[in-house]
Image (spheres, rainbow, N blue to C red):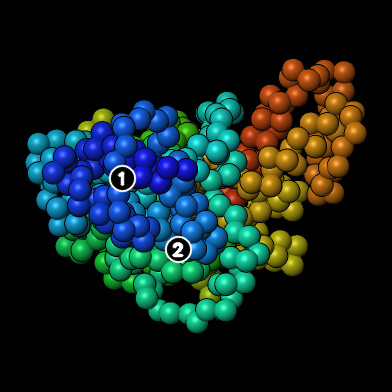
Amino acid sequence: MNIYQVIQQLIDCALGLELIEQEDEIYARNQILYLLRINDFVAGEKSQSEDKIPDLLEKLANYACENGIIEDLFDEKEILASNIMNCFMPKPSTVNRCFYEKYEENVQDATDYFYQLSRNSNYIQTKRIAKNINYKFPTEYGEVDITINLSKPEKNPKDIMMEKGLKSTNYPKCLLCIENEGYGGRIGYPARANHRLIRLTLASEPWYLQYSPYVYYNEHCIVLSAEHRDMKIDHQGLLRLVSFVEQFPHYFVGSNADLPIVGGSILSHDHYQGGKYEFAMAKAADEYPFQLTEFPAVKCAIVKWPMSVIRLRSENAENVVAAASCILDAWRKYDDPALDIYAFTKETPHNTITPIARKRHGLLEIDLVLRNNRTSEEHALGIFHPHQDVQHIKKENIGLIEVMGLAVLPARLISELQEVEKYILGKDHTIAEYHRVWAEQLYQQYKGQANQENVGEIIKKEVTAKFMRVLEDAGVFKRNEQGMAGFKKFIQHINGI
């Protein structure tokens, strides 16, 4: 490898993407040379390359490993790549100033700028994200999204051994804290030297906006509290969601629930997720319109969705937040023994919501997805959690993204589903035992119909059906006569009937 040529190609990419200007070229080059412990630079002829920034960073990391600059460890290569890209990055104050200058002209121009910066700087891992398997599939509830997540890198045993030997530190406190901005990284903790955040005010509080490094949908952003505190769904949190969509009306924003099992993967830092994407749930139709007695100006409806969703609409932010808070307060204490819904086990709470806010057709819209995290002997992972017969496809928590209709499925399914295809076709296979009952059902169902050309579509259809069952399992009021009657009974309870 001609290391000088690779460095120059990276600088040329940065110039082409306007990460730096021509006057910055020598400065950036010298910073990269320092990181690579190179004491000279031999300029060669300009050469065209198809390599993009992630490819060039990989080459530089390999050079560093081969020359003993870093160890051949995943984290060490990530730290180097992040710090190299930081040579092209403006300081946080500059990013924020540019963002708000654009915001004054057009809010979408501001988010476009910040999203492209996050992509071009390799903070958003575009090369790894491209490995994900994505498809849409129609259901009775609308067209849902299926993603098999292949973007998360796997560490080798040497990486894991290195992590085990290190002392823990409390800085940054977690992956979402503001202290991650510009953090150089360490073994066992991701490098964030090229990370920047936008300063926000939500309901008179300091918050921050960033994008997810592993975006699952268009402009997948994270909105995080300046204070490291536990997730909490309450009136103030609902105000913050509405405040965000009023400032960024082209984005939706939502929160994971604030209890284990039904919550997301990080409950230790108050945060939301949003973006410029319309999920299947957002498109779902009103199924049962109703009125809240105390809030006549708010339009309310049960949504046609496999989970239990109440949709509120109003022109007035105060009204829609007050109505949402009223429903949340009622749900926190609500029992329906006939449907296995209990709000408490002694002092332990079980009822909460997954709220989502958006602006649509000039109205503020809040969806409240009713959640309950109680467990039982039969359902040790959760009564309103994917049940045993669907866990071979999806066993993890059903968080905000899944709730809205995007299945994030584990990487293991890529090879495992290929074996299910062979089973359906009657070929030799090495099927995972936990797929066997399902595979036999599919074999009997599609016997004589399945062939090499259509078996892939059959698998897509049946995986989607499993995901819809996952959502139905997570619904507190089931989509049957008894469940819908229970849902309407809860609405009467809110109205004091």
Is residue 474 shown above or below 8?
A: below
Residue extending farthest bottom: 167
Image point 23% across, 42% down: which residue? 19
> Does residue 397 appear in this view?
yes
**In the rendered structure, which disc, 1 or 2, sits on the residue that comes first in sequence?**
1
Left or right side of 113 for 223:
right
Question: Could you say which quadrant of the image residue 204 lies in?
Answer: bottom left
Is residue 170 shown above or below 240?
A: below
Mark 1 Cα shell of 10 Å, populated few (<14), some (14-19), many (≥20) = few
Q: Which mark is residue 42?
A: 1
- For the residue pair 227 and 91, the one nearer the viewer reads as 91
- Tell us which disc is closer to us: 1 or 2: 1
Residue type, numbered disc 2? Ile
Q: Which mark is residue 485?
A: none
Image point 63% across, 41% down: which residue? 467
> Does residue 314 appear in this view?
no
Q: Position of residue 451 (x, y in %)?
A: 81, 19
Q: Which mark is residue 69?
A: 2
Image point 49% across, 69% down: which residue? 187
Is residue 116 shown above or below 295?
A: above
Q: Are marks 1 and 2 in contact (CB under 8 Å)?
A: no
